Image (cartoon, rainbow, N blue to C red):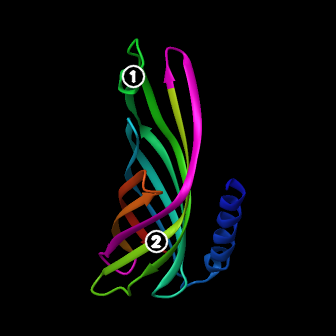
Amino acid sequence: MNTLFKATALAAFLAMAPAAVAQDSGLYGDIGLGQFSYESGALDIAATMIQGRVGYDFNDYFGVEAELAFGLDGDSVNSSDFGFVPNVSVDVDVNNTAAVYGVLSTANTNGFEFFGRLGFLQAEIKGSSGGFAVSADGEGFAYGLGAKYYFDDLNGIRADFTSIESEATNVSIAYTRKF
């Protein structure tokens, strides 16, 4: 799966590269905050992330985007939640996530644009307690819905919800800019 992710990311960036030199391109970028949540069995964690995206709209209805996010804070879980004794607190951080998406959207009408996206996300999670640390990578298909509102021809805000393999979610809000 890791090779599939790298190949998809490379294809997305190569598709966007010619647009970067065009004057009236569909290139855009976002910067914002997200709340990443993961739930599986007794494990339930949440982390605040700073997210950046770069995307390219081929036309009013189809585009691609790549996303990177880095954890600002994490969560803690107790070993007793999993039936272990003695009770030990474990700090859990989502170090980073990387994703690529295909995006379907509506045309910009009165500043509003609605979109859906489908892609692939990879995350790195780290747990630590008492001087011991362990990290794990997770990956999966991701899909979501969102909206953008543009104040003018270039600047706006974006809000979206993304689900990753039905175990993790991300809710985010961002400043968006067309180039």
| Residue 64 locus on image (x, y percent) | 55, 74
Asked if 50 appears above or below 143 in the picture, the reply is above
Kindly identify the residue that appears in the image at 69 percent across and 72 percent down.
14
Query: Residue at (55%, 84%) from the top-left corner?
Result: 58
- Which residue position holds label 2? 117
Q: What's the residue type where badge 1 is placed?
A: Gly
In the image, taking residue 88 as reference, residue 3 lies left or right, namely: right
Residue 1 shown left or right of residue 65 in the figure: right
Q: On the image, numbered disc 1 is attached to which residue?
A: 83
Of pointers 2 and 1, the one earlier in the residue sequence: 1
- Residue 75 screen position, x and y as percent: 38, 33
* The image quarter in which residue 74 lies: top left
The amino acid marked with disc number 2 is Arg
Q: Nearer the viewer, residue 67 or 116?
A: 116
Other-residue count near label 1 (Cα within 10 Å), few / some / many at <14 / 14–19 / ≥20: few
Which residue lies at the image location 59% right of the left edge and 43% below the top edge? 137
Instruction: Relative to 96, say whether 53 is above or below.
Output: below
Tell me where the magenta segment starts and ends, as one range: 128-154
Marks 2 and 1 close (CB-CB < 8 Å): no
Residue count near mark 2 (Cα–Cα under 10 Å), binned few <14, some 14–19, many ≥20: many
